Image (spheres, grey):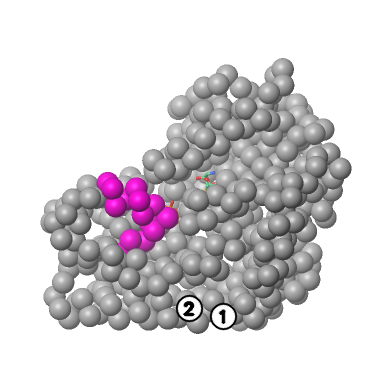
Amino acid sequence: MEPDVSKSDVSKSDVSKCRVCAGEVRKFFDFGTQPLSDAFLTEREADQAFHFRLAVGLCTACTMVQLLEEVPRERMFHHDYPYHSSGSRHMREHFAQTARELLATELTGPDPFCVEIGSNDGVMLGVIKDAGVRHLGVEPSGGVAELARKDGVRVRTDFFEESTARLIAAEDGPADVVYAANTICHIPYLDSILRGVDILLRPGGVFVFEDPYLGDIAERNTFDQIYDEHFYLFTARSVRGVARRFGFELVDVRRLPVHGGEVRYTLARQGEREVSPAVPALIEEEAGRGLAELETLEKLGQGIDRICADLVALLEDLRRQGRSVAGYGATAKSATVTNYAGIGPELLPCVYDTTPAKIGRLMPGSGIPIRAAGEFSRPYPDYAVLFAWNHTDEILAREAEFAAQGGKWIVYVPEVRVL
Ligand code: SAH
Ligand code: TYD
Ligand code: ZN
């Protein structure tokens, strides 16, 4: 990974200009200066980390929830991007199921073509490929793109945007489906994305994407979903709004039980498909919960501060008692928790993870060393903070022996608890 000495321009303004509608974005929470969440540096590189100001706000005009400061995309998504989608069995199953559904419903014509934005290591497109269906992944992070290619998946190492869409349309023709998971919320330039999708999609085709849902984040106060890469926190209402600006309609929504709660949005060109009753139903539910009101979102802040204070108090207490503690899952999310709460190696000496590109490196900002998950049992700590709480069932099953030998899991959303 390229070390980097420069800092971004940290301004302290409480308002910014909406990336969707140029309206006024009002801040509802400020995490202050934070490192990049997926920058796992070595000891030698650690003092050269890039920082930015992590603050989140609501557009008072179009209701889109977004970060106030944007990190240049090349700093986050590059050859050494460490996140591998295939790292969880649960997610592999989810994407296999997704691929089967797309094959059965949208990729049924004579020579269908599926494009995925942010295809990562090919976890979804691999299944499309196995079905013999024409496909293309668009993935700027060269390392994970290469892993997909090794599996026989066709990938273009590039950022998807309007110009990329034009090139793909010229080379491969129109797509029946453009799909993206956990990627569209990473992309501030939605204007270019939607114009690109419009260029690429055949008449009657659909744009399907799934991302963490503000409704779930607010319900369980999973505030660690807020980090550099998650530029937007979508609702059905805000997605419908941005879709309409570019000639699309939100025609379907489905809540998904992955990553702590997501919504899968289906967009079609205006007038091309009927709108499912699920769309107005979810938008009405959001209105009832006040998800587009600054007051509701500001209340989350009290919860964030309480959770962080409780977690630090628990870790300090365990240290006083001489208990050993470790973290489990060097997630991007955990950068927000550890850096905002001020948790470093003195409270949490190490974090275990299965990802080869993270092992032996340091947690961003906090500098907590990352060790191979295979070493978790040598010896087990007394307590383990479950940073990968979105994979609770999978990890508790995989590490059943830890609990069997008296080990205790600590979770922190929606509140700090010892399981
Ligand atoms: N779809 C996978 C990966 C999500 S991580 C999953 O759900 O697990 C987000 C991915 O989006 C990263 O691999 C990143 O490199 C990619 N990405 C970021 N900006 C992009 C853009 N403009 N076009 C295409 N991919 C992008
Ligand atoms: P994840 O929570 O999916 O994403 P993010 O980084 O976006 O917050 O990341 C899960 C992390 O947990 C990843 O680094 C792999 C690791 N992990 C394990 O160490 N063991 C496991 O059994 C699983 C499922 C994940
Ligand atoms: Zn706006």
- Image position, residue 254 (x, y; %): 62, 48
- Image position, residue 217 (x, y; %): 54, 65
The magenta segment is 385-398
- Tell me the SS state at disc 2: helix
Snapshot quadrant of residue 307: bottom left
Residue 149's disc is none
Tell me if 375 is positioned left or right of 184 in this view: left
Q: According to the image, label 1 marks what residue?
A: 299
- Image position, residue 375 (x, y; %): 19, 50
In the rendered structure, are the residues bearing label 1 and label 2 in contact, judged by CB atoms less than 8 Å apart? yes
Magenta residue check for 392: yes
Amino acid at circle 2: Gly
Q: Residue at x 52, y 28 (%)?
A: 127
Q: Is residue 300 above or below residue 145?
A: below
Q: Residue at x 36, y 54 (%)?
A: 392
Q: Quadrant of the C terminus?
A: bottom left
Does residue 158 appear in the picture of this structure?
no
Q: According to the image, label 2 marks what residue?
A: 303
Does residue 208 appear in the picture of this structure?
yes
Magenta stretch: helix, strand or loop mostly = helix
Tell me if 119 is positioned left or right of 236 in this view: left
Q: Is disc 2 surrounded by few (<14), some (14 to 19) or many (20+) residues within 10 Å? A: some
Amino acid at circle 1: Lys
Q: Is disc 1 surrounded by few (<14), some (14 to 19) or many (20+) residues within 10 Å? A: few
Magenta residue check for 30: no
Q: Residue at x 51, y 76 (%)?
A: 31
Q: Is residue 156 above or below residue 395?
A: above
- Tell me the SS state at disc 1: helix
Task: Report how many numbered discs are placed on residues in the image.
Answer: 2
